[in-house]
Amino acid sequence: MQPRQAGEREFVLELERWIASAGEALADLFPHHSGGVARQYLLKSAEDAGALFNLARTDGTNGATLTGFRNGYYPLRGLVDESFVARARAAWPSGRWYHIVDLTRCFPEDLKSIGSGNTAEELEADLAALLTEHRGRWAGFGEHPFDSEDWLDRHGVEAIETKVAPPPPESQQAEG
């Protein structure tokens, strides 16, 4: 399954609806330029959806792709303590990529990864660091939506995607 394709306005409206119903949505911004690195954002308000779209338009000088996720991302959540670490260890599907994110960072800050890997050794090192460096902070654990082709299918996640056109050249902006 692939994200549902949408026009720019439909994309923003859908994110606004998801945020209104669930209190948040996850968005991935991938700028179309050499060396472009995707960034994820946790959106908490309807205003965030529009602001993210504006960021994509200005940040993606060659255009950008925005993907929004309604649910299913980083499903294990809680304050970092021994219980959270034990639940993360039990939830990890051995051999699959996992990510640990700091859920206190919301748009306009990008979602901060505080651990990732796909081996038991990496997981144990990240969980130990989590307890020493992030104890008491709100964190999420799970697979990154783009780490595997079948993530949407396996998690039954609703996703939407749009292409954001690059801003017009400055000469056209001056004329308009």
Image: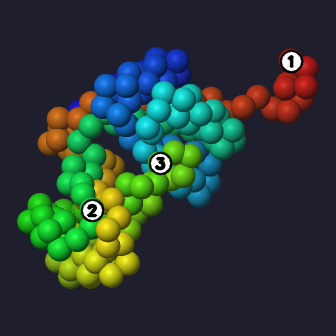
Quarter holding residue 132: bottom left
Residue lying at 33% horizontally and 49% vertically, measured from the top left: 146
Q: Which residue is mark 2?
A: 79
State left or right for residue 96 relative to residue 130.
left
Q: Secondary structure at mark 1?
A: loop
Q: In the image as oriented, which residue stretches furthest toward the front?
A: 136
Q: Position of residue 127 (x, y in %)?
A: 25, 76
In the rendered view, tell whether residue 77 sits above or below residue 7.
below
Around disc 2, counting alpha carbons within 10 Å, would you say few (fewer than 14), some (14 to 19), or many (20 or more)? some
Q: CA distance from mark 2 to mark 1?
A: 50 Å
- Observer-side mark, 1 or 3, equals 3
**Which kind of residue does numbered mark 2 sit on?**
Leu
Residue lying at 69% horizontally and 38% vertically, measured from the top left: 58
Quarter holding residue 51: top right
Q: Which residue is mark 1?
A: 176
How many numbered marks have been drawn onto this rendered protein structure?
Answer: 3
Q: Earlier in the sequence, mark 2 or mark 1?
A: 2
Residue lying at 85% horizontally and 24% vertically, measured from the top left: 172
